[in-house]
Amino acid sequence: MSLYKILLGIALSASVGVSAQDTEVPTPKKTFRNFINPDSLPLMNLRIVPIPILTSTPETGIRFGGALEYFFNAKEKDAEARGSYIHGQLTYSTLGQFEAKATWQVFTKGEKFVFRGSAGYSTYNDRFWGIGNNTVAENNYLAQDYSRIFLESRTYRLLKNQWYIGLKLDYNDVYNVVNAKPLTPDQNDVPGIYGSKTIGLGPAILYEGRDFPFSAHKGAYAEVYFARNFSFKNNPYDFNTWFLDLRKYYPLTTNSTLAFQLSSIHTTGNVPLRELPKVGGSVLMRGYFTGRFRDRSFTALQAEYRFHIWRWVYGAAFGSAGLIDDALSSYSTGNLLKAGGLGLRFLVNKKNRMFLRLDYARNSTAGGAYYIRLNEAF
């Protein structure tokens, strides 16, 4: 069996290819050979597809399980909306983490509405190094286990010219927190160290100018929102969140792209630990463990060059830099965090430009990380 078929099976690549096709294009037979072919898959009349899951990040270890995928393109007369998906999964990781999660990104007919979000339940193994830039040493973190119920939803209505206005809703309940060792007096004073429950609501603005939402080749993207998080019975956490995400994609050739992203998030008020902006993960500042640094304000810039290598194989080189502190006015270049790395991309759906992503990244403080994920980081 070829490397492509192995990677495709591991990475859920059979998950995409849907929507009715032009009657002049013959529908391929539902054979195994066509099922794993990125050229044939989009033409098959598949709707809901059960698939295996295998991903890996430093935060989760190797995560495995199963999912149901539904990919489609809403149609209005002769116009077809960009790719939409609804995804449900059950997974378990080698670090003992369980997750039941649904995610969605839906463009309605004529792209008049956009719905995005995720919801579910998970158990998680976290690490806490402290707040701010002066944290404990890399191996002196506080290990925490907890359970979480969450909902993150954004609903947008088209204004004109790919600009949308909408509403953001967040619910996050962190409970059953178990600490691996007794807390220090400083740790004990951190808001939300024993768990938290938050509800946030606010306006949001979106510009969706990418040609392919899963892996853009050209275009631009912008999202801005404000969320007011309310205190309520047995919940003292009353705070505000401002968020900015700007992306630009430059097509250098038909198979290469130079992409940039600026992301900035700021909080004020009584912010619990899990709601503080944080450095690291598989999306922004790859190479850092998620939460290696946390504080009230975080801004980062990343760039990535994506290029074709051979047939369905692509490559990527990326780098990022960021600042985190208690406020935007407190930023200092002396605390600049840096990370970068290389990656491979394997095309798993040609029509919607979906890739399996394998990345290795290192950071400027200590160590590095590898990631196996579906779709680009941004």
Image (tube, rainbow, N blue to C red):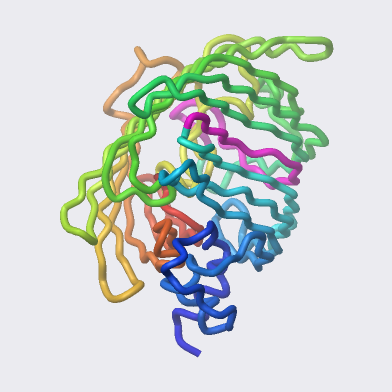
Answer with the quarter of the image where residue 14 lies: bottom right
Residue 96, compared with residue 245, is above or below; it is below
Residue closer to the observer: 286 or 14: 14
Q: Give the residues in magenta.
A: 112-136
> Residue at position x 35%, y 62% from top?
343
Query: Hey, which residue is sitting farthest bottom in the picture?
Result: 1
Q: Is residue 324 visible?
A: no
Residue 154 percent across, percent down from the top left: 57, 28
Residue 67 percent across, percent down from the top left: 69, 59
> Residue at position x 69%, y 13% from top?
237
> Residue at position x 53%, y 15% from top?
203
104 sits left or right of 323 in the view: right
Q: Main secondary structure of the magenta part?
A: strand
Residue 257, compared with residue 173, is above or below; it is below
Residue 369 percent across, percent down from the top left: 46, 57
Residue closer to the observer: 212 or 301: 212
Answer with the quarter of the image where residue 126 lies: top right
Q: Is residue 201 visible?
A: yes
> Residue at position x 68%, y 45% from top?
102
145 sits left or right of 43 in the view: right
Residue closer to the observer: 79 or 196: 79
Residue 259 percent across, percent down from the top left: 27, 45
State which quarter of the image contains the C terminus. Answer: top left
Residue 103, compared with residue 294, is above or below; it is below
How many numbered dots are placed on residues in this image? 0
Taking the magenta stretch, the answer to whether it contains residue 23 is: no
84 sits left or right of 205 in the view: right
